[in-house]
């Protein structure tokens, strides 16, 4: 007499787990992260470069004031102030 097993599952459960891992790896490869930088952010980055140059100029002026070698031109300062307030 031969006894047949009930609900014989021909698929190895370890193979199923291996297939699931492969599927998740494929999904990870399909979904890639993307970064978009707006024009405003690019403009802000360029402003940082300008600020670095400006900071160098400020440091030079501070050193000149501390050394006593800074000689401002009063007429040029007045002209620039007038230009500024006339534009506003």
Image (tube, rainbow, N blue to C red):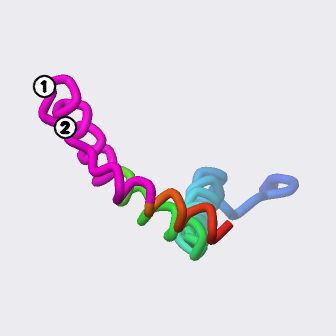
Secondary structure character of the magenta stretch overall: helix
* Residue at the image position 44 percent from the left and 55 percent from the top: 78
- In this rendering, the answer to whether 67 lies above or below 88 is above
1 vs 62, nearest the viewer: 62
Q: CA distance from mark 1 to mark 2?
A: 8 Å
Residue 30 appears left or right of 6: left
41 vs 50, nearest the viewer: 50
Magenta stretch contains residue 79: no
Give the secondary structure at mark 2: loop
13 vs 54, nearest the viewer: 54
From this viewpoint, which residue is outermost toward the right? Answer: 6
The x, y position of residue 55, in whole percent, is 32, 44
The x, y position of residue 48, in whole percent, is 41, 55
Magenta stretch contains residue 74: yes
* Residue at the image position 34 percent from the left and 49 percent from the top: 74
The x, y position of residue 59, in whole percent, is 24, 37
Give the secondary structure at mark 1: helix
Which residues lie in the magenta part? Answer: 52-78
Quadrant of the frame with the C terminus = bottom right
* Residue at the image position 76 percent from the left and 59 percent from the top: 9
Numbered mark located on residue 67 in the image: 1
Numbered mark located on residue 79 in the image: none
Residue 47 sits in quarter = bottom left
Residue 77 sits in quarter = bottom left
65 vs 16, nearest the viewer: 65
Q: Residues within 10 Å of mark 1 (few under 14, many from 20)?
A: few
Label 2 belongs to which residue?
70
Quadrant of the frame with the N terminus = bottom right
The reply to whether residue 1 is visible in this rendering is: no
Task: Tell me whether circle 1 and circle 2 mark residues in contact (CB < 8 Å).
Answer: yes
Residue 70 appears left or right of 51: left
């Amino acid at each position: 007499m031969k006894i047949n097993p009930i609900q014989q599952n021909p698929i190895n459960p370890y193979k199923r787990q291996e297939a699931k891992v492969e599927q998740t790896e494929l999904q990870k490869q399909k979904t890639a992260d993307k970064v978009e930088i707006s024009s405003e952010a690019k403009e802000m980055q360029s402003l940082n470069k300008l600020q670095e140059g400006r900071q160098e100029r400020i440091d030079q002026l501070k050193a000149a004031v501390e050394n006593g070698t800074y000689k401002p031109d009063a007429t040029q300062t007045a002209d620039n102030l007038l230009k500024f307030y006339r534009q506003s």
